[in-house]
Image (spheres, rainbow, N blue to C red):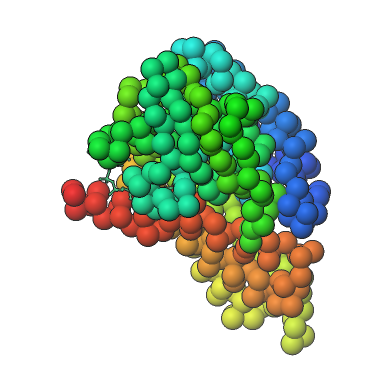
Amino acid sequence: MDFTLSEEQLMIQQAARDFAQQELLPGVIERDEAQKFPTDQVKMMGDLGFMGMMVDPKYGGSGLDTLSYVLVMEELSKVDASASVIVSVNNSLVCWGLETFGTEEQKQKYLTRLATGEIIGAFCLSEPEAGSDATSQKTTAIDKGDHYLLNGTKNWITNGNSADVYLVIAQTDVKKAHKGINALIVEKGMKGFEIGPKENKLGIRGSDTHSLNFNDVKVPKENRIGEDGFGFKFAMKTLAGGRIGIAAQALGIAAGAYEMARKYSKERKAFGTEISNHQAIAFKLADMHTQIEAARFLVYKSACDKDNHVNYDLSGAMAKLYASQVAMETTVEAVQIHGGNGFVKDYHVERFMRDAKITQIYEGTSEIQKIVISRSILNL
Ligand code: CAA
């Protein structure tokens, strides 16, 4: 497979690299420490077209391919994974879901503003008792004729407080199990919709993660996405693409930490020479580089599968599984190469190590990816 980037893709990649260095790097440590959402930077990313990268320009998007999106995710994540998850959820889960399955009215009303970054979105599937076991939805959306009455709690929702539009998965008819689930568009400010306290997280601390409570929220029928009972398939299809974005995030975290470790190894001296001259360090870097390249091939392949309209459930799951594993291993080694300095916040690598962990958990844990992969290769 040929991954030679086009002129346009190279330009987009460079634009994301420049943005990350100029606008994300300054203040990234402080935002992490204070759990501060990058409001100004999100606005700038909207202006650059990063918030609706694959959306048709007629809905305000950039009309680019998935590979371009992955390149941007990788570059942003080399510097600030908190910023990149905001981009990922808005692009792959919210905008893609609405553009692919929404009505024309829903697209005009919501997608046009989401794709430009004027507002941002959240994807609400997880619950206190339905994380990996996503069919066990306890949130209910009872059909009341012209509206659904929404009740329940969602947990660990990215962009939980900053979003204006929430795609909420809920059970309408429990007898039909996953075929009785719907996906509803809920707006911030709807009566009975409350945002819970912010989670105090290990990593990606600049992104805001909240629980959400729905108490008799009246959601108009026209806010349902797809046919009655399509909600679970909607979630699965959307997450299949979302996993490519998170795989690219993991790749970027690994690449960012590796590059810092490589540079550091050529500056830091021990036993009379740069530590890169010690084979113990050089071999670590060799392993890191090899694993990152392998992860990159899987991530780009899954993006190309999506662009070529080939089924990407398998390649996306493999990309996420492997890239997140590489992110974890690489960042641990990057801290090790930095020694005592690696344990200090100023050197960034400890943040990369903390940020890496979530890539093995959200949008399907590594164990869930193995379920998807094994079912696919065994034709189950
Ligand atoms: N595309 C289309 N349909 C799919 C699908 C896909 N990729 N995967 C499953 N389905 C369909 C199945 O075909 C089946 O439908 P039918 O009965 O009509 O055939 C239905 O969905 C149920 O599928 P399963 O029987 O396979 O369901 P399951 O209970 O065994 O679970 C699972 C499957 C893959 C484990 C799924 O529950 C899953 O992906 N869990 C993980 C959920 C997850 O990723 N959560 C992340 C939260 S979101 C998040 O993190 C966002 C954020 O803020 C960053």
Decide if residue 135 is in sight here: yes
Residue name at image x 79 percent, y 64 percent: 346
From the viewer's side, name the closer residue of 353 and 196: 196
Disc count in the image?
0
**For residue 182, side relative to residue 53 (left or right):** left
Residue name at image x 76 percent, y 70 percent: 344
- Quarter of the image holding residue 111? top right
- Quarter of the image holding residue 7? top right
**For residue 149, side relative to residue 212 (left or right):** left
From the viewer's side, name the closer residue of 228 and 372: 228
Q: Quadrant of ligand 1?
A: top left
**For residue 206, side relative to residue 329 (left or right):** right
Residue name at image x 36 percent, y 39 percent: 236
- Quarter of the image holding residue 303? top left
Q: x and y percent of residue 172 in the render?
A: 35, 32
Q: x and y percent of residue 103 in the render?
A: 43, 16
Q: x and y percent of residue 28 in the render?
A: 76, 51
Residue name at image x 59 percent, y 71 percent: 333
* Residue extending furthest toward the bottom: 271
The quarter in which the N terminus is drawn is top left
* Residue extending furthest toward the left: 379
Q: x and y percent of residue 158 in the render?
A: 58, 44
Decide if residue 306 is in sight here: no
